[in-house]
Amino acid sequence: MHSIVVFCGSSEGEDPKIIADASKLGSTLADQNITLIYGAARIGVMGHVAQGCLDNGGKVIGVIPDFLMLREVYHSGLSELIITKSMHERKLKMYELSEGIIMLPGGYGTLEEFFEIITWAQLGLHQKPIGILNTNGFYDELLAMLRKMIDQQFLKKENYEMIQVDDRIVRLLQKMRDYEPIPVPKWLKKGQV
């Protein structure tokens, strides 16, 4: 993987370990020569991931829609800043630039980005590795809900297993490197979607 998009909050939350892990993820990506793609903010968890990468000499590409330029207080020190016309264009651009996806703690926007990307994988539109950095069990209840979806037959187990989960950055990145995508369903052809 040469580039990873990170979905995470524009708020800091209240757990200092989340901020520490965000910064460490950024520095680890820089150490491993992996370009960070993210939502361009200098605030919140997003800002800590970016600054961790930049402080360690890494490449950071921020993607932000024009209407959020002031609201999310974009980071002016990025390697590259891409301005889009909409949230949908932003998400598509981040996806196109990345070879892997990681979700850190965040709110509605983080979940929305993550679930659209995992849905695309479920539909066979991509086979990029998708990871969750589960700092201090932040996503334990979400993962339990997904397992309930399997139990209730709303989600196939193999689609749940597309998500790589760990609370350690280096282990998560290794799981993502080792990920073997499930075959695209025979009933679905990429051109039909």
Image (spheres, rainbow, N blue to C red):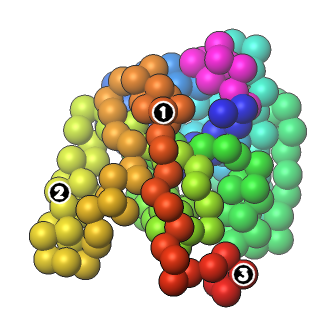
Cα gap from disc 3 to disc 2, whole angstroms: 34 Å
Tell me the mark number nearer the camera, choosing from 2 and 1.
1
Characterize the local packing of mark 3: few (<14), some (14-19) or many (20 or more) Cα atoms within 10 angstroms: few
Please, what is the three-letter code of the amino acid marked with disc 2? Ala
69 left or right, relative to 155: right
Give the magenta-colored segment's residue range. Answer: 27-36
- Vertically, is 7 above or below 148? above
Residue at screen point 28% across, 48% down? 139
Residue at screen point 48% across, 44% down? 180
User: Residue 23: where, in percent of width, then height?
Assistant: 53, 23
User: Residue 181: where, in percent of width, then height?
Assistant: 50, 51
Cα gap from disc 2 to disc 1, whole angstroms: 24 Å
How many numbered marks does the figure carry?
A: 3
Q: Which mark is residue 132?
A: none
Residue 90 visible at all: yes
Of the residues under marks 2 and 1, which one precedes in the sequence?
2
- Residue 34 on the magenta span: yes
As helix, strand or loop, the secondary structure at mark 3 comes to helix
Q: Quadrant of the N terminus?
A: top right
Please, what is the three-letter code of the amino acid marked with disc 1? Asp
User: Disc 3 designates what residue?
Assistant: 191
Cα gap from disc 3 to disc 1, whole angstroms: 28 Å
- Vertically, is 8 above or below 133? below
User: Disc 2 designates what residue?
Assistant: 144
Of the residues under marks 3 and 1, which one precedes in the sequence?
1
As helix, strand or loop, the secondary structure at mark 1 comes to helix
Q: Which mark is residue 178?
A: 1
Rendered image quadrant of residue 48 = top right
Tell me the mark number nearer the camera, choosing from 3 and 2.
3
Rendered image quadrant of residue 54 = top right
